[in-house]
Image (cartoon, coloured by chain):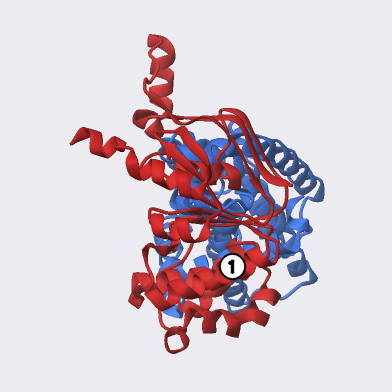
Amino acid sequence: MIFMKNKYLDLTVQMTLSEFRLRDQGTLLGFFWTLLHPLLLFLILNLLFIKWMGKFVEHYPLYLLVGIVQWNFFASATSYSLSSLIRRAELVKNFTFPREIIVVSSVLTVFLSHLFELLILTAFLLLSGATFTPLFFLVPLIVLVQLILVISISLPLSALCVYYRDIERIWGLIVTAGFFLTPIFYSLSAISEQRRLLLLLNPMTHIITASRSCLIYNNAPNFSLLGIILLLSLLILFIGFKIFRKMQRKFAEIL
Amino acid sequence: MNVIEFENLSKRFRAGGENRTSIFKGISSAFTGRKTAGAFWALRDITFSVRKGEIFGIIGPNGSGKTTLLKTIAGVLYPTSGVVRVSGSINFFLSLGAGCQRELTGRENVYLYGALLGLNRGTIRKNFDRIVDFAGLHDFIDTELTHYSSGMYSRLTFAVAMQAEADIILLDEIMAVGDISFQNKCFETIKEFRDRGKTILFVSHSLDLVSEYCGRSLYLDRGNMVACGDTKQVVELYRGTPTANDKNV
């Protein structure tokens, strides 16, 4: 695909780094600002649910934290890259490099913050008594699947968003709904059988569950489920890429 | 040998309204059958060609389609009908400072802008000193772009753009900013490019510059091709004709 070419790889890296620097003001302080939102969410949910959900879930605070961090990447990366073509309209109008680089570098910008968050999360886990197991090494694999999933969603959505600006609002609603339809602060076992199906159809459920089994519970994740998500993401990515290519001819005019 | 060929090329833009469409609007218009009206031809039935090694001028009043023409050559815009054939790689310099991040330093922007033009990091690093020399921005290279004047802005981006090796170079009104000495430097570079067999397309409102440097020129008015050929005659025709703007007066 396009990333075979070295110059496009350079461009992706260059755009990601400069956007990252601007987004977090390039400072440690700026980075802590982005941490504030998930942290606040964690403190509140933990306060409210530790008594109740603690009955179903072992190590509830850690369970909650992993859920929030993983969901936060999905939510903020898709939302941020959704409007990337509109935000960088001047690039679309004045350069001819493949437009998907704009979307991908936006995802990667958020991904960089996510990597730092994961580092902090791991440090926190170890400090709070979790033991380091070889399963920790599987986390990058899970995160990679998650990244591909996010890009596969972001590509077609960002292209559509050029034509239909209200996609951004609609996606905002979907993400809000998604937060409650993913076992982030509650556990799957607390949900009745029939309704559980709804949650199991959500790929983020499995990504978060797999992350928790590796990081907290020292259980091997369900590889076949992760494999299915990966294949599905690749399929969506392929279709999304086709849609994107087809639509991109008009980007420069519409923006 | 022709490196750029236009054959009956037309480009239509949809005007206003439709730019900010929404799903709700789309659904409602599907029911009411109402189409967002308004389209105009930015280019109409353009046929001309540019030979290898030429400096080719494009002139015409504001809104005549000069930039649209360059953008269809560059491949940013696609023609509505007709064809444009380009043989060779293109480097274009359309709008000043597009792609730069004002909050980053000159140095960081050199790398960023270079990457946008398709230069890899190694090439930029190798030519970094030359770029800064050309732009004459030694003292400001670690200053954020916010503090740059528009002239400094254009010097920096132009200096980077000229590092990109390409067979065809498109320049859109680059002389609007920058002082005399920088302008001269630019034209030295442009002539040097021509001597190396590169083709340069050059949009300008300065008829003097076009007369001085371009062998042949194209005169556009409201998307139509008025004349194409020897610059002297084309410029004379342009000087003699009342433009769209004048007519309104």
Quadrant where the image shows the C terminus of chain B: top left
Q: Position of residue B97 (x, y in %)?
A: 44, 63
- Residue B227 in the image: state x and y as whole percent: 48, 37
Extreme residue in the left direction: B249
Question: Does residue B244 lie above or below B184 as drawn?
Answer: above
- Figure quadrant of residue B28: top left
Left or right, B183 with respect to B1, comes to: left
**Along the horizontal axis of the image, is B20 left or right of B47?**
left
Determine whether the residue tagged by mark 1 lies in a helix, strand or loop: helix
Q: Which residue is mark 1?
A: B191
Q: Is residue B221 above or below residue A147?
A: above
Chain A representation colour: blue
Q: Nearer the viewer, residue B129 or B99?
A: B129
Decide: is B128 above or below A109: below
- Name the colour assigned to chain B in the rendering: red
Residue B127 versus residue B52 in the image, above or below: below
